[in-house]
Amino acid sequence: MDLAFRNAVAKARKQDGLYFASLLPENLILDAFGKASELWQGWIYTPVATVWVFLSQCLSADHSCREAVANLKAWRLAAGLRTCSAETGAYCTARDDVPEEACSRLTRETGRQVAEAAPADWRWLGHRVLNVDGSTVTMADTPANQTEYPQLSSQAAGCGFPIARIVAVFCLATGAVLDAAIGQYHGKKTGENSLFRTLHDRLQAGDVTLSDRYFAGWFDIALQLQRGAHVVGRKHQKRPTDFRTGQRLGHDDQLVRWNRPQRPKWMTPAQYALLPGVLVLRELRVHVAQKGFRSREIMVVTSLLDAKTYTAAKIADLYRRRWQAELNLRSLKSVMQMDRLRCKTPHRVRNEFFMHLVAYNLIRGVMAQAAAKKGVEPCQVSFKGALQTVHALLPLLATKIATDDWCDELLTAIASHVVGNRPDRIEPRLIKRRPKQYKLLQHPRAHYKKQAA
């Protein structure tokens, strides 16, 4: 892994590309754009340069177009190239021309490369584990965004923000995003499980999907098994459990048969006919003895039926790692500030969402390199520390620093930021630093302006 990374950095520097070329090669961007790159007209803001500048904007703390263009201007100046205008209009126009499919394809490709480069011993019992979870993001309050991603119905008009639901499929070993979907927050076919069904094409035979009980419906499990994947998830609370009725495999461990329910409206008769009449699954009761955990016992359902290879303890340990998806989402939404997207049109919002995932995958790729070099797993390395290190050292590629020296310092610095080992710690869900005591906006802003006039 280390040698391939050094070669990629050295090759990118010889091509005089923007310093993000070391993390995202030009050919990968052009492949994602396809024929769209042939129609692109731009002197400075070519498809490749536009994506690189977009990435710098997603990774910055400021997130402004002005800073992104300033970074490009500084790099061109340091590289001895003709500088560009400090105005943001040309960049914003070029960014608006970026196809949505190119951004989503870049997300899948960067995630795939990070996952495939991971050492084999990072896999769980030889399986690629996909950690699935969903969340929400808000965006700029504009008429266009409100039309496509309406605010919560409980909020008064003009007092809320457009909101979208997202679902991400993470690689458990590396934390990279393998694919993702974004859609409306409420309405038919807008739930997390519905969004995940649009991503089932990414499942491979032998994969293990790790998820919470929101994805534990009969049809969600059956559709994954149909593709040769396995499931490990929390059993839905509305489905009863009786360990006296199943085939006993051990204490609180049994095989059960789930009969096929009636066809749901979202499924065609042809799709329904291809599914089996009965699912044979395994149910386990996991007892939680640690203090501070909200659940004292958890019912886990899985399609891994071999109790000798996949012992109850191993299944329980794997399900506990599902929490990594929550930490990954925290890295995206809090550390990278993706919780509030800034674009003013739905097309740009979706591109901004996927480009955040691409930038996230690039950081995860470097973290995997550093973790492999140190002999630890990526989850033991701080994402925020890696982001800060990459953001500080990337501009040095425009100088005369030796490639090997740069790579050594980057990977060593990232590997040194180890996440504290604090198992089973208890922290109250309370905050000490309070926000300023402003009243909430309960009417459109124009209403208050008229009162003040």
Image (cartoon, helix red, strand yellow):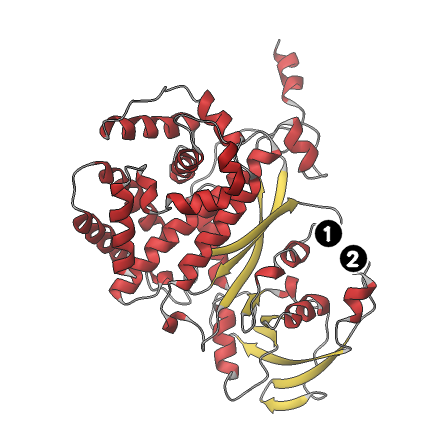
- Left or right of 358? Residue 449 is right
Quarter containing the N terminus: bottom left
Residue position for label 2: 266
The vertical placement of 237 against 344, above or below, is below
Which is more N-terminal, label 1 or label 2? 1
What residue sits 25% from the left and 42% below the top?
A: 14
What residue sits 63% from the left and 86% below the top?
A: 254
Residue 159 on image: x %, y %: 65, 30
Which mark, by number, is residue 189?
Answer: 1
Q: Amino acid at mark 1?
A: Lys
Which element type, helix, strand or loop, lies under badge 2?
loop
- Whether residue 340 is visible here, answered yes or no, is no
- Left or right of 322? Residue 260 is right
Q: Amino acid at mark 2?
A: Trp
Residue 381 on image: x %, y %: 33, 58
Residue 348 on image: x %, y %: 56, 34
In this view, the residue in front, 5 or 304, is 5
Quarter containing the C terminus: top right
Residue 16 on image: x %, y %: 28, 37
In this view, the residue in front, 77 or 421, is 77
Corner quadrant of residue 133? bottom right
Which element type, helix, strand or loop, lies under badge 1?
loop
CB contact under 8 Å: marks 2 and 1: yes
- Whether residue 349 is visible here, answered yes or no, is yes
The vertical placement of 388 against 204, above or below, is above
In this view, the residue in front, 390 or 398, is 398
Crowding near pointer 2: few (<14 within 10 Å), some, many (20+)?
A: few
